[in-house]
Amino acid sequence: MILVVGATGVVGGMIARSLLEQRQDVRILVRSGSNYQPLVDAGAEPVVGDLKDSASLAPACRGSDVLITTASAGSRGGADTPQTVDLEGNRHLIDAAREAGAQQFIFVSTIAADEASPVPLLRAKAQTEAYLRASGLPHTILAATTFIDLLLPLVVGGPARAGRPVTLVGEGRRRHSFVAARDVAAFAVATVGHPEAVNRRLVIGGPEAFSLRDVVATYERVLGHPIPVRTVPPGELLPDLPPVPGLAEVISRMLAALETFDSPIDMDETARTFGVRLTPLEEVVRREAGSEPADAAAAPA
Ligand SMILES: NC(=O)c1ccc[n+]([C@@H]2O[C@H](COP(=O)([O-])OP(=O)(O)OC[C@H]3O[C@@H](n4cnc5c(N)ncnc54)[C@H](OP(=O)(O)O)[C@@H]3O)[C@@H](O)[C@H]2O)c1
C-alpha cells in the first residue's frame, strides 16, 4: 500500500493518478473540505486526516509500506502555515510512519531548503529533511528546483496571448534548471522501491537550464509573433498578474530572487538511473499555449 499525502494538490495528484494507472494500491490522506472524489473514483482509498492533528495520521499510516508526501502549507493559508504543516505536520507524519513500520518515506522538498533561510517555508523544509534523516526510516528526499508550470502562464503566456508586453523583474537572463511539476511526480513514482533511491537526497531539475528571456523566445516561436518585453527593477511588483491576493508579491519576489543566481543542473545521470524522461521547455510551452494535446505526455520513459 502506498500512502500519498498532498494528493489533492498539483504534484500529489499527478503521483496518485500515475500510481493508480500502474494498478498499485493507493491510499490518500484527505481533508473533508478538499475535492478528492475524482481520485476515489479512480480507485484510491481515502483516509480523513490532517497533518496538524497527529492522532489522525496513525490510521492512514497503518499498513502503508511507502509514504509519499508533497503536502505543504505553501498555497493554503489560515491555520496551515509553514510552522504547523511543513515543520510540525511533517514531524507528526514521520513519527506515524516510523510507528507503522514503513519501508520508505519519500519527501518532496526544494533545492532551496536551508535551515538558516529567512523564509519560514525553506527553513521548515530543511528541518524536515534533517528530522527524516535522523528518524532511521529508509527515505528519499526529492529536492526540486522551481516549477516552471505556474510561471509560464502567469508571467509570459498570459500577457503574450493577450497581445500585451511581458514584464520581467531585472533582466531575466539568469539561467535556471526549472522543472515541470509532472517530472517531479514522475521521479516520486520512479523512486518507489528503487534501490538507488534509498537514503538519498536527489536534486530534481529540468533537462536544460534556461532564462525567462529564453521562455519569451520560445513563446515567440510557438505563437509565431514577436513579444515585447518590459522590465521592472527587483523590489517592484509585476503589473499584469491576475488579482489574486498576495500573488503579485509572491511571484515578483520569486523572480527577484531568481535574478540573484544561476542554477544549471546536470540531470542526465539521475534521469537515466530512474528512467524518467524530462520534459523540455518547448514541450511545456506548446502544451501551455494549447498547441499540443494536454496529454501528449511525458512520463517515466
Ligand atoms: N512550486 C515550486 O516551485 C516548488 C519548488 C520545489 C518544491 N516544491 C514543493 O513541491 C510540493 C508540491 O507542490 P504542489 O504545488 O503540488 O502543492 P499544492 O498544489 O499547494 O498542494 C498542497 C497539498 O498539501 C495538502 N495540505 C496542506 N496542508 C495540509 C494539512 N494540514 N494536512 C494535510 N494535507 C495538507 C493540500 O491538501 P488540501 O487540498 O486539503 O488543502 C494539498 O493536497 C510542495 O511541498 C512544495 O513545497 C514546490
Image (cartoon, rainbow, N blue to C red):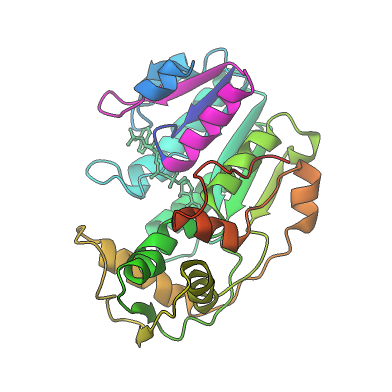
In depth, the one of 59 and 172 nearer the eye is 172
Which residue is located at x 25 percent, y 72 percent?
240
Which residue does the image show at 57% across and 54% down from the upper left? 144
Give, as a single range, the part of the protein colored magenta.
Answer: 10-36
Query: Horizontal and vertical percent for residue 79?
Result: 24, 41
Q: 15 or 2, which is in the foreground?
A: 15
Q: Is residue 151 visible?
A: yes
Residue ID at (65%, 42%): 187
Placement of 81 over or under 120, stated as above or below: above
Q: In the rendered image, which quarter contains the N terminus?
A: top right
Residue 35 included in the magenta stretch of the image: yes
Image coordinates of residue 7 in percent, x first then y, are 44, 32
Left or right, residue 297 beside residue 150: right
Rendering coords of residue 132 (x, y %): 59, 39
Report the label total.
Answer: 0
- Report if residue 114 is visible in the image: no
Can you give x and y, in whole percent of width and height, for residue 208 in the image? 66, 66
Rendering quadrant holding ligand 1: top left
Instruction: Assign the C terminus to one quadrant of the image.
Output: top right
Where residue 247 sits, quadrant-wise, is: bottom left
User: Residue extending furthest front?
Assistant: 224
Give residue 194's quadrant in the image.
top right
Q: Is residue 196 above or below residue 62?
A: below
Residue 24 in magenta stretch: yes
Q: Quadrant of residue 198?
A: top right
At 33% from the left and 49% from the top, the residue drawn is: 75
In this view of the protein, which residue sits in the foreground, 93 or 21? 21
